């Protein structure tokens, strides 16, 4: 199963741990130290006669974690406009304005202000904050570079090891993620978020029991957090226990709604987006398509400001389209079939698709095209596809195999596969033939594509990115 947009709690000094939860979470000891240092620095800014009395009121508004975002940014802007500070003091103002932008989910401006501050005074907190903003943008390599710099210039920090682990996990480097979470837990053994995210990394490595143990420990350490329950939802779904998956996702929603996240580093709306998508996927997997459609719709209604939430919404859009299709499936039956089908111009429904895929099944889509009529033919894709399909079948995959598919056949084959992926633990896609990238999106080329001027070329192709985000 593809982990899709799980909450990735990020820890952030001087604020509470970066988490899709509330600001009442316990602060780590050295996070107190960061906050105290910055608070003292802020106090020093306003202690002298530099500002007039009316302007002095701007200081607490700019440098307070509890100030609403727009008021905080406005106060910091007015202080910057006075042009009375330089060096470390000026860096402090840029830092707090970045905090305001973080509250609004404006990653680009967080990066701009922390970059200004770093130019004035390099600091571990600033590198961590900028790296966290790059993480939320989905620019994981740059985030890792910033976390590396933070670890290089400051003392060992469980917070930063944790955040770097998030970036490794988002890149698919799960073993490196586990190593960083291990170090974070060694430094902060009672930090629920690190157990939660290590569990998510173990789940991606296929260690469902180890993942469940870590998630349970996170819940034990802080039962008020909604995001570990969302992680556990994914594990129950992978284990085929859909009732428990739905129950955990529902409880996560209740916690999120009861205690609205106020942590300034929480991407707006991310908790409920994540809870809705994973409850929807559990409902779809158990055949409760009406509730699945409701939750997919709720996922799309949320405001997505971070990469994980945007990925969740992309998945919801595809899954909702599949369930709204006139050919949407009936509730799945329990007996799977190990047979496959070979599609030509119009594929017949696969035995696997008609029988229904059970939880824990591994499914694969394998396509090889070479009989092109409008573009250059390729000699090897069908042989390669058949070989890959055979190998996957030998190790237990249910394979949907298509050879020389036109556009209609490719669309039907891929949509049937995506429906099967809803109940599968692992979903693999293999394609051998022509492909193109247009405006940053990847397309598969069916055998009946005609290259003609004046038309929209992508209308004759199949969007590979839609297939990838539609896997669950």
Image (cartoon, grey):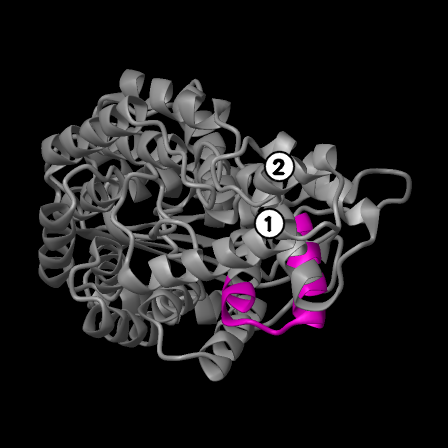
Residue 470 horizontal/vertical position (percent): 44, 42
Considering the numbered disc 2 on the image, is that residue within a helix, a strand or a loop?
Answer: helix
Q: Which residue is mark 2?
A: 72
Q: Say few, some or many: other residues with alpha carbon within 10 Å of mark 1 (under 14 / 14 to 19 / 20 or more).
A: many
x, y (%) of residue 50? 75, 50
Q: Tell me where residue 81 appears, x and y as whole percent.
A: 82, 45
Q: Which portion, as a residue range, is magenta?
A: 107-128
Residue at 26%, 54% (x, y): give it.
Answer: 193
Q: Nearer the viewer, residue 86 or 360?
A: 86
Q: Residue at x 55, y 30 (%)?
A: 68
Neighbour class for label 2 at 10 Å: few (<14), some, many (≥20)? many
Q: What label sits on residue 96 in the rendered view?
A: 1
64 relative to 454 in the view: left or right: left
Query: Horizontal placement of 169 versus 336: left or right?
Result: right
Residue 192 seen: yes
Q: CA distance from mark 1 to mark 2?
A: 8 Å
Q: Secondary structure at mark 1?
A: helix
Residue 37, x across and y down, in percent: 46, 62
Place residue 186 in its image quadrant. bottom left
| Position of residue 130 in the picture relative to residue 200 (left or right) | right
* Viewer-proximal residue among 264 and 300: 264
For residue 249, above or below residue 470: above
Mark 1–mark 2 contact, CB under 8 Å?
yes
* Tally of numbered discs: 2
Viewer-side residue, 330 vs 439: 439
Residue 73 drawn in magenta: no
């Amino acid at each position: 199963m593809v982990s899709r947009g799980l909450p990735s709690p990020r820890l952030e000094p001087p604020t509470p741990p970066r988490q899709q939860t509330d600001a009442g979470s316990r602060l780590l000891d050295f996070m107190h130290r960061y906050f105290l240092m910055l608070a003292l620095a802020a106090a020093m800014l306003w202690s002298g006669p530099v500002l007039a009395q009316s302007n002095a009121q701007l200081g607490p508004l700019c440098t307070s974690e509890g100030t609403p975002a727009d008021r905080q940014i406005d106060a910091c802007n007015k202080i910057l406009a006075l042009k009375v500070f330089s060096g470390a003091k000026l860096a402090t103002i840029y830092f707090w304005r970045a905090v305001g932008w973080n509250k609004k989910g404006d990653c680009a401006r967080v990066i701009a202000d922390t970059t200004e501050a770093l130019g004035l005074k390099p600091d571990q907190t600033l590198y961590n904050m900028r790296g966290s903003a790059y993480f939320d943008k989905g620019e994981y390599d740059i985030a890792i570079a910033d976390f590396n710099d933070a670890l290089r210039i400051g003392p060992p920090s469980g917070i930063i090891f944790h955040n770097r682990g998030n970036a490794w996990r988002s890149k698919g480097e799960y073993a490196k993620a586990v190593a960083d979470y291990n170090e974070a837990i060694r430094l902060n053994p009672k930090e629920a978020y690190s157990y939660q995210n290590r569990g998510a990394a173990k789940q991606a490595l296929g260690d469902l029991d180890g993942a469940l143990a870590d998630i349970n420990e996170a819940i034990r350490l802080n039962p008020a957090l909604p995001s570990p329950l969302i992680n556990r939802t994914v594990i129950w779904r992978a284990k085929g226990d859909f009732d428990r998956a739905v129950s955990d996702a529902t409880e996560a929603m209740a916690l999120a709604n009861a205690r609205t996240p106020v942590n300034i580093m929480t991407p707006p709306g991310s908790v409920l987006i994540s809870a809705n998508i994973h409850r929807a996927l559990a409902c779809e997997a158990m055949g409760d398509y009406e509730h699945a459609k409701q939750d997919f719709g709720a996922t799309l209604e949320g405001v997505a400001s971070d990469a994980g939430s945007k990925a969740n919404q992309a998945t919801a859009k595809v899954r909702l389209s599949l369930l709204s299709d006139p050919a949407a499936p009936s509730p799945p039956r329990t007996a799977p079939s190990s047979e496959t089908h070979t599609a030509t111009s119009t594929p017949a429904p696969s035995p696997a698709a008609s029988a229904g895929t059970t939880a824990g099944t591994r499914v694969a889509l394998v396509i090889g095209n070479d009989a092109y009529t409008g573009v250059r033919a390729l000699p090897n894709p069908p042989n390669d596809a058949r070989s890959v399909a055979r190998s996957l079948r030998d190790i237990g995959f249910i394979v949907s195999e298509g050879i020389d598919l036109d556009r209609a056949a490719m669309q039907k084959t891929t949509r049937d596969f995506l429906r099967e992926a809803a109940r599968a633990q692992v979903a693999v896609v293999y394609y051998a033939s022509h492909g193109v990238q247009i405006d940053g999106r990847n397309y598969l080329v069916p055998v009946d594509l005609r290259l003609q001027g004046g038309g929209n070329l992508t209308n004759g192709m199949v969007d590979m990115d839609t297939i990838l985000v539609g896997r669950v």
